[in-house]
Amino acid sequence: MGTPEFALSTLQGLIDFGLNLCAVYTQPDRPKGRGNKLAPPPVKELALKYDIPVYQPVKLRDPAVVEELRQLAPDLIVVVAFGQILPKSVLEIPQYGCINVHASLLPRYRGAAPINKAIVDGESETGVTTMYMDVGLDTGDMLIKRTTPIGDLETAGELYVRLAQIGREAMEETLRQLCAGTLVAEKQDDALTNYAPMMKKEDGCIDWTRSARQIHNQVRGLDPWPGAYTTLQGEVLKIAKTAVEAGSGTPGSVLSAAADGVRIACGDGILRVGELQLPGKKRLAAADFLRGCPLLPGTLLE
């Protein structure tokens, strides 16, 4: 059970592992692009490539859907970013339970956006945890953990790609131990958790009185979506590819604008911005952006 690109590596791993995949469950096709044409989820496309039956229930908890799944009689259900909560009636079906691949080092960052939140919070490392699923939100017993450092300039989009592969590796190790009878489950300590809710567009609004480091983490954690932004003369200005430098000035004021970046004063330190984007325009490197939109020192961003 999975839907976005993040789940592809694990699905491919299950296929390569040689398991008998009796079905793939994914979200319904959704409108996409300017023409709003229905597009299949990435997981569906991969499943069909291997002639694996695909099911796309609107609501997994629908009694007819649950009964259909019960008739498939799976030994194990693997869940990766499926997008629906599994009800108790589904969790109880497989003999070996439901195992989830979660993109954080549980019990830290339960919830829908663990990759984004770890970066926004300035974490230096993260990882993937496989766990038995229960009726709670990412509260099940932990199985296998894989840890990886977070680069100082790494964005959520870049980390997403790396963790997808790490998720595959963690799930493969989980399967090996499950088959060998050596898999050990560990209870989560609820006191150590930190909830990571789905990101919203307003989370990208920059408060220039915060430190350059905090804003830098916000920019990275929200790239590519929803993106960090400020306002320039009443227009939304998205910013990306930032770095932290020493210095001071009035928070939100442009200190300099050069080919290597636009330097903006923060509550503590300076943020060098390497890419900028105005509404309806492409995201541009600072040098290209400044040719069409000069930013004079003293310009105030809000």
Image (spheres, rainbow, N blue to C red):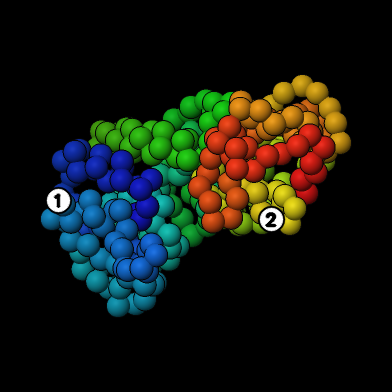
Is 297 rendered above or below residue 197?
Answer: above
Q: Which residue is mark 1?
A: 50
Q: Residue type at mark 2?
A: Glu
| Residue situated in front as seen by the camera: 98 or 229 | 229
Q: Residues within 10 Å of mark 2 (few under 14, many from 20)?
A: few
Q: Quadrant of the N terminus?
A: bottom left
**Viewed as shown, does residue 195 lie left or right of 75?**
right
**Viewed as shown, does residue 198 lie left or right of 174?**
right
Residue at point 55%, 36% (across, down): 288
Residue at point 48%, 60% (across, down): 135
Q: Residue furthest front?
A: 291
Answer with mark 2 or mark 1, whichever residue precedes in sequence.
Answer: 1
Q: Residues within 10 Å of mark 1 (few under 14, many from 20)?
A: few
| Residue situated in front as seen by the camera: 104 or 293 | 293
Alpha-carbon distance for marks 2 and 1? 48 Å
Is 83 rendered above or below residue 294?
Answer: below
Location of residue 184 in the rendering, given as x and y in whole percent from the top left corner: 40, 35
Is 73 rendered above or below residue 115?
Answer: below
Question: What is the secondary structure assignment of the residue under circle 1?
Answer: loop
| Residue situated in front as seen by the camera: 118 or 234 | 234
Location of residue 26 in the rendering, given as x and y in whole percent from the top left corner: 32, 61
Q: Residue furthest top?
A: 246
Q: Residue furthest left?
A: 51
- Tell me, for residue 11, which label it has, or none: none
Q: Which residue is mark 2?
A: 235
Report whether residue 122 is seen. no
